[in-house]
Amino acid sequence: MDVGSQQRGQWTSKIGFIFAAAGSAIGLGNIWRFPYITGQNGGAAFVFVYLMCILVIGLPYLYAELALGRYVHKNPVGAIRAIRPGSAWVLIGGLGVVTGLGILSYYAVIAGWTVGYIFKMAIPNQITFGEFVANPYLVVSLFAFFILITILVVYGGVQNGIERWSKILMPLLFVLLLGLIVYANFLPGSGKGLAFYLKPDFSKITGKVVLAALGQAFFSLSLGMGLMITYGSYLSKEDNLISSGFYVALADTAIAIMAGLIIFPALFAMNQNPAAGPGLVFQVLPAIFLHMPGGVIVGMIFFLLLSIAALTSTISLLEVPTAYLVDEKRVARKVAVWIVGGLTFLIGLPSALSQGAVSWLSKPIVGGMEFLSLMDFVWGNISLTVGAFFLSIFVGWVWGAKHAATELQQGNPAFARWAPFWSFLIRFVTPVFIFIILLNLFKFFG
Ligand code: PHE
């Protein structure tokens, strides 16, 4: 029985869900974060570990979130409450809601830069990336603009807002990336970049590399904060969670790999440093656009599509805390959206100002990271990884892998054969693997 689905929104079609979930997954994580993290972690060996993490941890864990979400039709907090009322597990749902705010707070800052770059491409006599991000008026107003657009879309609710946008624009991004791959790999000197990206040197794999890869896998698939619980809650029992989830993961991984196939060849062709950090994509791509025939237009279209890819992700990030307020606190949706959006803006200001605008925020705080990178590490990596650790235990042991597998079989009876294998992954492999990787983290900080 579809409890509560009359009052709650539902996706209009299977394909609508796939586009919306893929819209959440595909974003700055693929095109901005994946290349810069890959560059910092030595290239191909990282890519290999990343792909393993997606396959062995990310995809099975995605099914756990989707199953729980569709079973209870609730936000992460409500979902946990429905299974284990009055237990401390609800804190994990709460962590997810807070993580949504945390990620959105700096994510929308970067998304603001991409909007700025649509226009920056058109202006000759470029200011540098460094000058651009150090201008407080520019970055704060672009950040505010992005939050505002996100609020306005989420305001419209599940079907009108989220679904419609994703359907049209994601395929367009795909085609543009394909074209850019071809262009970048014809640049003289690009071969070295391709080797850096695709020829693994396995001796480079360290605990730090694996943590970065695992965190990136969760970040990119929008996992670990209950987002897929929330999106799964808008699905109906006829939907096939297994195939839908698989397409989402496939599309997300493909876009990230494609982004790398552009960035690294171009980067090496221009003799730049792959470990440049969060500014990497904003420094490398405009430089290739400027040398390319018709590059101004291509560059503008690229940053426009990237902004939209980011928007379908910020929408989803805003949706989790919003769904929490609507379901659990009975706040009207239109009010909830403004509360969450406003709060995010305040929390995000230090990140926006941490790239040169305010000097003490821009200095390394811990581990060589300035404020924004630190937020990205804390929320975008650690918090998601910790969240996934507890949620995999929750689904595998507390709710029970059996119940979850039964849910996954609805809409895909053939899954019965795979259920024992999946249960093993979610009960043992995922939590143990994450635990070991997190232990390593404490070693780094002494
Ligand atoms: N997956 C998104 C991206 O790669 C970011 C995101 C993380 C969105 C977590 C929602 C939840 O850009």
Image (tube, grey):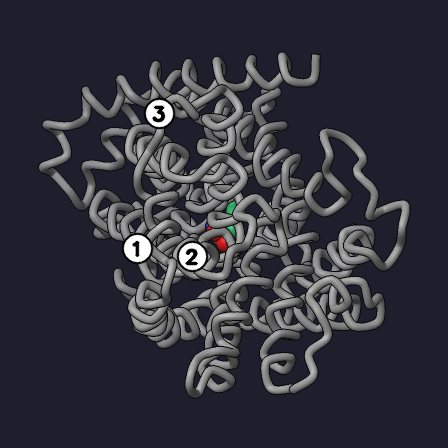
Q: Residue at x 57, y 23 (%)?
A: 89
Write down the residue under mark 1.
Answer: 251
Q: Quadrant of residue 169?
A: bottom left
Residue 259 lies, with reference to residue 99, above or below; the image says below
Near-viewer residue (398 or 347) = 347
Circle 3: element type: helix
Q: Amino acid at mark 3?
A: Phe
Q: Secondary structure at mark 1?
A: helix
Q: Amino acid at mark 1?
A: Ala
- Dot 2: few (<14), some (14–19), or many (≥20) neighbours within 10 Å? many
User: Where residue 32 sits: x, y (%)?
Assistant: 52, 55
Q: Earlier in the sequence, mark 2 or mark 1?
A: 2
- At label 1, counting other C-alpha atoms closer than 10 Å, the crowd grade (few under 14, some 14-19, many 20 or more) is some
Looking at this view, is 267 or 54 the one in front? 267
Residue depicted at x 66% and y 67%: 112
Q: Is mark 2 within 8 Å of ligand 1?
A: yes
Badge 3 is on which residue? 202
Q: Measuring from the top left, give residue 188's x and y in whole percent.
A: 36, 64
* 399 vs 239: above or below: above
Tell me the kind of residue under disc 2: Ile
Percent position of residue 315, x then y = 55, 62
- Tell me the CA gap for discs 3 and 1: 26 Å
Give the residue at mark 2.
Answer: 26
- Viewer-side label of 3, 2: 3
* Label 3 crowd (10 A; few <14 / some 14-19 / many >=20): few
